[in-house]
Image (cartoon, helix red, strand yellow):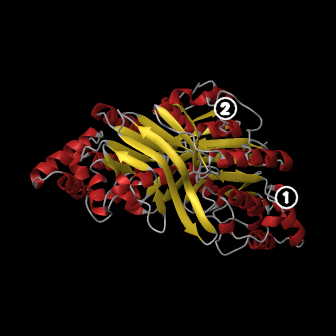
Amino acid sequence: MSMLSVENLNVWFGSGRSRVDAVQGATFDVAKGESFGLVGESGSGKSTILKAITGLAPQWDGSITVDGRPLTQKRVKSFYKLVQMVFQDPYASLHPRHSVDGVLGETLHLHGFRDIDTRVTKLLDDVGLGQKFRFRYPHQLSGGQRQRVAIARALAAEPRILLLDEPTSALDVSVQAEILNLLTDLRAEHGLTYVMVSHDLAVVGHMCERLAVMKDSRIVEVMDVAALRAQKAEHPYSQELLRNSIGA
Amino acid sequence: MTLLDVENLWVKFPTRQGVFDAVRGVSFTLGRERLGIVGESGSGKSMTGRAILRLIRPPGIVEADHIRLGDRNLLDLSERDMRAVRGQQISMVMQDPKFSLNPVMSIGEQLIEAYRLANKSGRKEARQASLEALESVSIRDPGRVMAAYPHEMSGGMGQRIMIAMMLIPSPQILIADEPTSALDVSVQRQVLSIMDDLVTSRGMGLIFISHDLNLVADFCDRVLIMYAGRVVEVCRADRLHEAQHPYTRGLLNSLPRLNEPREKLEVLRRDPAWSTAPSVSGRA
């Protein structure tokens, strides 16, 4: 059964003459427990698809179905119990004047949990940070530690789907390896479904089972990772992308 | 032939907790070659590039036995003489063109200014030279680009314009600090091959600073690997994948690879001894 299904999705910004069609006719399915990648160059609309799913891009049509329920323009609160997002830049996505405890506690409170104290403890353990980080502020954390906090915040609602927007592109390769391993473990432990945007084909190849290649706001090809590893892309653009990825 | 000779370079920053050494005793020479400097953030690779041009602002301190360019020691030059070195003899391309170009001057004006600072010439000649410079970095419509402002350009275009501008005074050495990190892979390749052509055809020396091991292995001739302000290993770029130092090995192994799928990525274990061992010399 598919956990997330996107059909004929169009997303645009602005209106009239300044209208920009960021995503046109995107269609894909993500099965329960699967990890699905979106690749393409900047401006191809891959992050916009994630934004449309979470409700950060209000102008869209087509259909998005999450766990069997079609989404309406307005997201209901229970939607965020199901879907959470992790952003690219851990330096920008945490409030500089809120401590880790504050960030996680507030999120838990908003989701209506009562046992906040035990849950914060558990979240920090889950993402491999431990209790000594609980009362630190973002500037006292490294990039990798911040991204762990951002992942803990996304997990606070106990979602089933995580949308990952370039979760490691701001990090060094050694830290990237730690975060990717963490995401692999969390998926297995919590039975999560991932949709991951990345410009790095090797990262997507490592994390995902299937991927969609985007160009100029359209999905040009959906393939599985075996085809990616064998360099068997069908669309000329995907072939070019494969050739350009150094070390691929 | 040696263009640049750096011996025992230190960059220090006094802080409330004592002096912090960002670069510790780095030595290397640069000939007519492409020298890569790789390392993680905070390893001192950018500081090394900036220190050569004496671009470290006080309270930062640059110390070295010598930084020799030709027969002059850059550390002995006055600030005024140093200004003549910057751009004219050693140029630098930074990571993000958005912050390197003047947002309120058209690209043409900026290129013309750069040309006229380097050559005593009239506007007409400078304009012609600027158009040629833009053509040399594969910009198809140089006339239109000359009249445009930086915000109208894409990242790849902006970076090519920066390279054109840096090469106008025909410097002997180009220092490129993460010149393609802000660009897409397809554009990255274009910019690199343009830079490569220009550097080879003019017989320049290139210092290429990057965090991307694969890119450096592919693009450079020789590589210095930096960790905690020191050079831990020097090797030929095409042999980077056979590197011996545990830090370099760790970095290489932590990269996911398309042709070798695995369950888990290897995580780098840092040995405190790496940061205290003396710097390896990068002399050719």
SS of the residue under disc 2: strand
The vertical placement of B75 against B186, above or below, is below
SS of the residue under disc 1: helix
**Whole-percent x and y of residue B88?**
26, 50
Name the amino acid, label 1.
Answer: Asp
Q: Name which residue lies at 59% across and 65% down.
A: B19
Query: In the image shown, does B278 or B239 lie closer to the viewer?
Result: B278
The chain carrying label 2 is A
Question: Is B5 left or right of A45, judged from the image as shown?
Answer: left
Q: Nearer the viewer, mark 2 or mark 1?
A: 1
Q: Dividing the picture into quarters, in which one does residue B2 lie?
A: top left
Query: In the image shown, does B43 or B212 lie closer to the viewer?
Result: B43
Question: Is B82 left or right of A162, judged from the image as shown?
Answer: left
Q: Quadrant location of the N terminus of chain B?
A: top left
The chain carrying label 1 is A
The numbered mark at residue A125 is 1
Query: In the image shown, does A64 or A148 lie closer to the viewer?
Result: A148
Question: Is A64 left or right of A234, judged from the image as shown?
Answer: right
Q: Is residue A211 visible?
A: no
The numbered mark at residue A224 is 2
Mark 2 vs 1: CB contact within 8 A? no
Question: Is A151 left or right of B36, judged from the image as shown?
Answer: right
Name the amino acid, label 2.
Answer: Asp
Q: Does label 1 lie on the same chain as label 2?
A: yes
